[in-house]
Amino acid sequence: MKRFLSVLVILAGTSLGVFGKALCLDNELKALGGGANASSSQNAGRWRVKGMTLEATAKKPYVVFNGSNIYTGTALSVSGQKFFIQEHDWRKHVLPIVNPQILPQYRKPIKTIAIDAGHGGKDPGFISATGMREKTYALDVCNRLKAQLTARGFNVVMTRSKDVFVELKDRPAKANAAKADLFVSVHFNAAASKAARGLETWMLTPVGEASFGTKNLKKEADPANVNDGANLLLAYHVQRALCGKIDIEDRGVKCANFAVLRTLNCPGVLVECGFFSNPAEAALTATGHRRDQLASGIAEAVQQYARALRAPVPESGRPTREDIRRHRIFKH
């Protein structure tokens, strides 16, 4: 699926006005049981927290969880050997992964998954140099994913089950009508350079920041922004599960205001499963083995997401009223 999102714009000078105060990342992680910064570099940080490794680099607009980049709205900074992160970025791009227990409304059992095969019918999506049509391979992955999820006991709803065109607005509407608990849209990527490669997972852009590769700040919430924290958690688990299963470059979790994500009543992500414009990745996608890997990786991610939300909360880890007030990420 062709994207023109190759340049990340750092909004220097406007970030404080948009995002508010900065938090000391070291202190926030320590409060959640994390260890001290184990990095010997003044401009790099590495912490262990709740079984995960979190890394950060000064002046970089992302943090790294267990090897996956999670892009933030603004770059992190260092002062006095302490790392600082905007409160907005902490709430929207870090905290839900470190402490999913602050999302109590999503702890209910997950029953129905909506699967969205990109493109279809008159819209072929990207066509590779060898004639592979994105719409065909996206649908094949989704059919395999449906089988994987059904075998695991989930109910599955597909926005399209054959080669038909479905309007973008009708895709989330189908998920909402089925009262889906999660939504996953499957695509393949493309770029002007044949060297571009890798896998990336997209979540809806939170209010107050720009979509990846753009500079226009999102000023008004979409209906699905109520799920910001869960969107991030799902995106993280999808990215980690897929990159852990497939030998592919991890391009991280990014934000965009995609139409298929904006009006969802449930958490949702869009996955770019490799580049059709890269001959080597297109050739791998042509194999049933790779498409099986993609399907099983997403299915595993759904279960990992559910386990993360339902994990027992130790008394010492229960959020206080102040925690809930301060980190109410399920608000816009």
Image: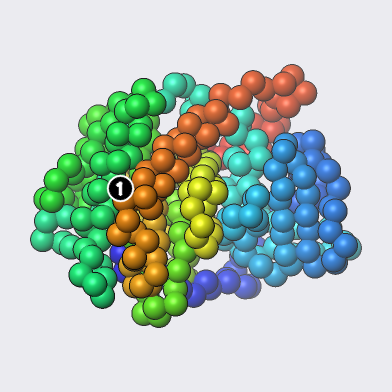
The part of the image, by quadrant, that contains residue 313 is top right
Quadrant location, the N terminus: bottom left
Which residue is at a point 18% across and 63% down the rendered structure image? Answer: 124
Q: Considering depth in this image, is 152 or 23 the residue closer to the camera?
A: 152
Coloration mode:
rainbow
Front residue of 119 and 246? 246
Q: Amino acid at mark 1?
A: Val
Provide residue 64's location: percent of width, then percent of height: 65, 56
| Badge 1: residue crowd in 10 Å (few <14, some 14–19, many ≥20) | many
- Image side of residue 147 versus residue 75, left or right: left
Residue at 36% over, 72% down: 279
Q: Say left or right for 52 vs 240.
A: right
Q: Quadrant of residue 143?
A: top left
Residue 158 location (% of width, % of height): 23, 38
Q: Is residue 332 visible?
A: no
Q: Quadrant of residue 149?
A: top left
Q: Position of residue 321 (x, y in %)?
A: 68, 26
Element carrying mark 1: helix
* In-image side of 59 versus 287 (left or right): right
Q: Check the image and report above or below for 261 versus 282.
A: above
Q: Which residue is mark 1?
A: 141
Q: Which residue is located at x 21 percent, y 55 percent?
A: 136
Q: Residue furthest bottom?
A: 193
The answer to whether residue 319 shows anywhere in this view is yes
Which x, y percent locates residue 156? 28, 31
